Image (cartoon, rainbow, N blue to C red):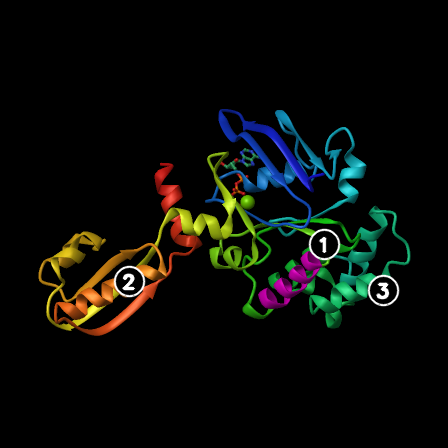
Amino acid sequence: MAAIQINNVEKSYRALKALDGVSLTIEEGEFYGLLGPNGAGKTTLISIIAGLNRADAGSVQVHGHDVVTDYRQARMRLGVVPQELVFDPFFTVRETLRLQSGYFGLKNNDAWIDEVMHNLDLTNKADANMRALSGGMKRRVLVAQALVHKPPVIVLDEPTAGVDVELRQTLWKFISRLNREGHTIVLTTHYLEEAQALCNRVAMLKGGRVVALDETAALIRRISGSQLVVKLASGALPDELKPLVSHPEELIGGDKYTLRVNEYTDVEPILAKLRQSGAVIEDMQLQQADLEDVFIQIMEGEK
Ligand SMILES: Nc1ncnc2c1ncn2[C@@H]1O[C@H](COP(=O)(O)OP(=O)(O)OP(=O)(O)O)[C@@H](O)[C@H]1O
Ligand SMILES: [Mg+2]
């Protein structure tokens, strides 16, 4: 059974189609990236998964439980870290987490609350009022709130927006541990290097549609190869290498060239040809395509 099954979900706000027939299957145990530019429909989709928003058409199940007709069962299995910071300012951190436990019918949840606070570096703020916390601290509490009922499926909507390096590392360590222990993670972020490092699979949304979906590594391999940048101290680029140059303006009187390579094994013959032609390399760099390159390429193709 899928952790989250999304079937043909549509959602419009007046004339605007925020979701235009989205279908995704997120398997149990995945670390899944949901990426896309501002306004792509990510938060709309997440709020439908969380049962906070109704789809116009289609359906969503969490561990087989429909988020509308079987809301309570679906909600029990789901922890959502929302994009927007919303709190009751008069409660302390610990009270907020106890209250949230109460919503899920959990009494005596303090041992887990303490563990979550410890892992998110919140312990010394346990008795601080929510209104007295900085933005990054509030976001830690949002994450903690989503985890109080140990949900098997955790959805994080831009959890690291406006968050310092230390918390990011703390957060990813904890979330990765939960993933290793079997929790399914769905992550939305604009930090593509985070998505690349963490997610085994990525879906890209644009204009309410899925425009790319694959394993992260396959996406990077499929869309674009690497580039070998060579700077020559003397000599010229041999004619047979000229078709590999990805920026043609470099052929006019330059000494630095960017050559397309598909695999590491392409590099050796290029170097051999340069050597045979008598060219001397002053500097050289192999630039690996990354998820950001792929993202830009796909989004441009979708214009
Ligand atoms: N309550 C609403 N009323 C009207 N339009 C809305 C509402 N909520 C979202 N939208 C619109 O739906 C589209 C998708 O918004 P959504 O918040 O899902 O995007 P997103 O992918 O989460 O973007 P971001 O990266 O900026 O968070 C946007 O064009 C947005 O303006
Ligand atoms: Mg959003």
Q: Which residue is mark 3?
A: 111
Query: Going 14% across and 67% down the picture, which residue do you hit?
Result: 255
Marks 1 and 3, how far apart in space? 20 Å
For marks 2 and 3, the one nearer the N-term is 3
The amino acid on which the numbered mark 3 sits, given as a three-letter code, is Ala
Report x, y in % for residue 271. 23, 67
Does residue 134 appear anywhere in the picture? no
Left or right placement of residue 167 versus residue 111 in this view: left
Does residue 107 appear anywhere in the picture? yes
Relative depth, front residue between 185 and 213: 213
Q: Which mark is residue 30?
A: none
Nearer to us: label 2 or label 3: 2
Q: Residues within 10 Å of mark 2 (few under 14, many from 20)?
A: many
Report x, y in % for residue 38. 47, 44
Nearer to us: label 1 or label 3: 1
Q: Which residue is mark 1?
A: 182
The amino acid on which the numbered mark 1 sits, given as a three-letter code, is Gly
Marks 2 and 3, how far apart in space? 53 Å
Q: Which residue is mark 2?
A: 228
Asked if the residues shown at circle 1 and circle 3 are in contact, with their CB atoms under 8 angstroms apart, the answer is no
Task: Name the quadrant of the N terminus.
Answer: top right
The residue tagged with tag 3: helix, strand or loop?
helix
Magenta residues span 167-180
Q: Quadrant of residue 236?
A: bottom left
